[in-house]
Image: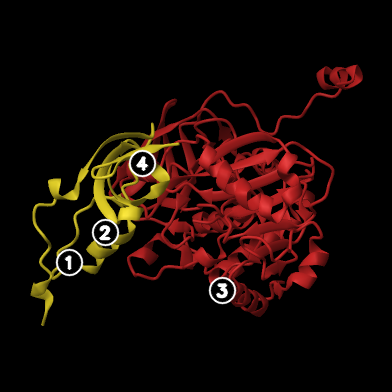
Chain colours: A yellow, B red
């Protein structure tokens, strides 16, 4: 059984988690072009090596960040998303 | 093993024939360099030589011939897809497969078995009807069958309603087949080699040379070579190789595991698949049950096997065929699958001039080997993407024009 260290639930079976893909910068909601959105949504780095990804612990619906190696399957560290995302995205500017 | 058989094997009177020339040196220049010596790359080389007379071609393979996903799939061939584009494409592949043994004069053990996609829910029944209608419209033989017919088609199938996921019906696709995947690759390799194509194994591509946005050369661990055109056909490492060329793909590399049981007497003629239960199983001509399940739940460049995969697969398989409980597993393995967001491949032109791609073959690559080979050869030879594969181009993701085939994928995801 592969274990994932969840920042709030501790070590749990990795089958309790969902991988949400690599952490990438979202295009600006107001000015992002179609090309930027297509790349953000579909095009992948698909890195062979250390990646930084979104993961969710399904039973508690808790999203966090995990750093792991896609060659060795080693989970390096996990931490709350608030460690790297300090500000909420402001969508209100798009109301018109 | 009888002594006479051993003696025959080592006899100089009956030497086993090589499938391709063992070449010492790379030439300094080729018209076409194909990166990846798997089924798709070899098929493209074969059709380039046979249909277009282009024989100054090198196939470069990092490992040994066809040792990647060509040797790791579960060898199922079918065309009962969901989108008209997909059905047309895979149907051409089946037609090519049916004549391949004759064309090669080499037995690929093509065996038409019929293919059942079981449905255990109303939603799965709805998808089955949808696929049946799309298939019939395009002249592909598929129909929805119910438990009374299933009992005749597959007498060993557990049709009891007292199970966790009772079977409501199935999509029956009579042309569904299996073939010996190694033989397909070797047949293409021999046919290409006989026509002058060079196949270089243990030759790793480490980069490319460009001039004005156009590829003009390939760097390898055995030196640099010049080339007119490049085809990348390296399933599993597609993203890594495309980065060497300078562009990214809509692909995640995810392991897909499979296993075979010990051989038993023939009992399962038809191929049985359940998308809802994440099971597909067929019996090989050697008597082994060839089994697969869901792809792994997260990206990984590793071909390790896991207990979770086997637990999930066997849990459902035992419900479909309870009597296989005493069978032992003989082998287990995994391949790295190129998963795309819409479950369709990525074929055709790329942002780099003269650099063509054949990738994104996820869990549906083997069955496309002949059609992909012939159509990619046409693309390289004429510099024009044929209409049949146009819908699969990389550009579709930038137009938000995906080709959703998830509903027709056998592999649960």
State the CA–CA distance, disc 2 to disc 4: 30 Å
Q: Are marks 1 and 2 in contact (CB under 8 Å)?
A: yes
Is any part of residue B52 visible from this angle?
no
In the figure, residue B400 lies in which quadrant? bottom left
Q: Please give the count of numbered marks on the rendered protein.
A: 4
Q: Residue under label 2, please give it.
A: A40
Q: Which mark is residue A32?
A: 1
Closer to the camera in the image, A21 or B83: A21
Label 4: how many residues lie within 10 Å, few (<14), some (14-19) or many (20+)?
some
How packed mark 1 is, by other alpha carbons closer than 10 Å (few <14, some 14-19, many 20 or more), is few
Instruction: Provide residue B201's location: percent of width, then percent of height.
Output: 55, 30
Gap in angstroms between the C-alphas marked 1 and 3: 33 Å
Q: The residue tagged with tag 2: helix, strand or loop?
A: helix
Relative height, residue A4 to residue B165 (above, below) = above
Question: What is the chain identity of the residue bearing mark 1?
Answer: A
Task: Kindly identify which chain the residue marked by label 4 belongs to.
Answer: A
> Which comes before the other along the chain, label 2 or label 4?
4
């Amino acid at each position: 059984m592969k274990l994932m260290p969840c920042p709030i639930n501790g070590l749990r079976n990795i089958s309790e988690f969902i991988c949400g893909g690599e952490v990438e910068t979202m295009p600006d909601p107001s000015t992002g072009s179609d090309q930027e959105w297509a790349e953000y949504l579909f095009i992948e780095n698909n890195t062979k090596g250390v990646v930084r990804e979104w993961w969710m612990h399904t039973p508690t619906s808790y999203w966090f960040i995990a750093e792991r190696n896609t060659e060795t399957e080693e989970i390096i560290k996990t931490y709350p998303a608030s460690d790297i995302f300090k500000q909420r995205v402001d969508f209100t500017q798009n109301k018109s | 093993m009888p002594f006479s058989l051993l003696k025959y094997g080592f006899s100089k009177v009956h030497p086993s024939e090589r499938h391709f020339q063992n070449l010492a040196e790379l030439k300094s220049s080729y018209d076409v360099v194909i990166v990846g010596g798997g089924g798709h790359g070899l098929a493209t080389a074969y059709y380039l030589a046979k249909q277009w007379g282009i024989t100054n071609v090198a196939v470069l393979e990092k490992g040994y011939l066809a040792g990647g996903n060509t040797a790791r799939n579960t060898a199922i061939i079918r065309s009962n897809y969901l989108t008209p584009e997909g059905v047309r494409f895979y149907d051409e592949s089946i037609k090519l497969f049916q004549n391949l043994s004759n064309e090669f004069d080499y037995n690929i053990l093509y065996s038409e078995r019929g293919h059942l996609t079981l449905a255990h829910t109303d939603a799965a029944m709805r998808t089955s009807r949808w696929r049946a209608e799309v298939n019939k419209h395009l002249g592909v033989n598929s129909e929805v069958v119910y438990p009374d017919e299933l009992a005749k088609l597959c007498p060993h199938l557990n049709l009891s309603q007292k199970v966790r996921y009772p079977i409501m019906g199935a999509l029956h696709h009579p042309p569904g087949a299996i073939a010996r995947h190694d033989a397909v690759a070797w047949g293409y390799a021999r046919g290409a080699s006989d026509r002058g194509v060079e196949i270089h194994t243990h030759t790793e591509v480490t980069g490319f040379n460009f001039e004005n946005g156009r590829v003009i050369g390939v760097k390898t661990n055995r030196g640099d070579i010049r080339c007119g055109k490049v085809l990348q056909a390296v399933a599993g490492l597609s993203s890594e190789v495309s980065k060497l060329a300078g562009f990214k793909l809509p692909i995640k590399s995810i392991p897909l595991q499979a296993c075979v049981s010990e051989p038993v007497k023939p009992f399962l003629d038809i191929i049985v698949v359940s998308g809802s239960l994440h099971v597909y199983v067929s019996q090989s001509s050697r008597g082994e049950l060839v089994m697969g399940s869901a792809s792994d739940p997260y990206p990984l460049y590793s071909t390790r096997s896991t207990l979770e995969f086997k637990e999930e697969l066997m849990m459902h398989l035992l419900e479909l065929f309870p009597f296989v409980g005493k069978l032992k597993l003989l082998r287990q393995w995994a391949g790295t699958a190129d998963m795309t967001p819409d479950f369709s491949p990525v074929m055709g032109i790329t942002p780099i001039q003269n650099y063509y791609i054949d990738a994104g073959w996820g869990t549906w690559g083997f069955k496309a080997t002949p059609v992909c080979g012939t159509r990619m050869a046409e693309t390289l030879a004429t510099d024009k993407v044929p209409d049949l594969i146009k819908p699969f181009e990389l550009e579709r993701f930038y137009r938000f024009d995906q080709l959703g085939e998830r509903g027709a994928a056998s592999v649960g995801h």
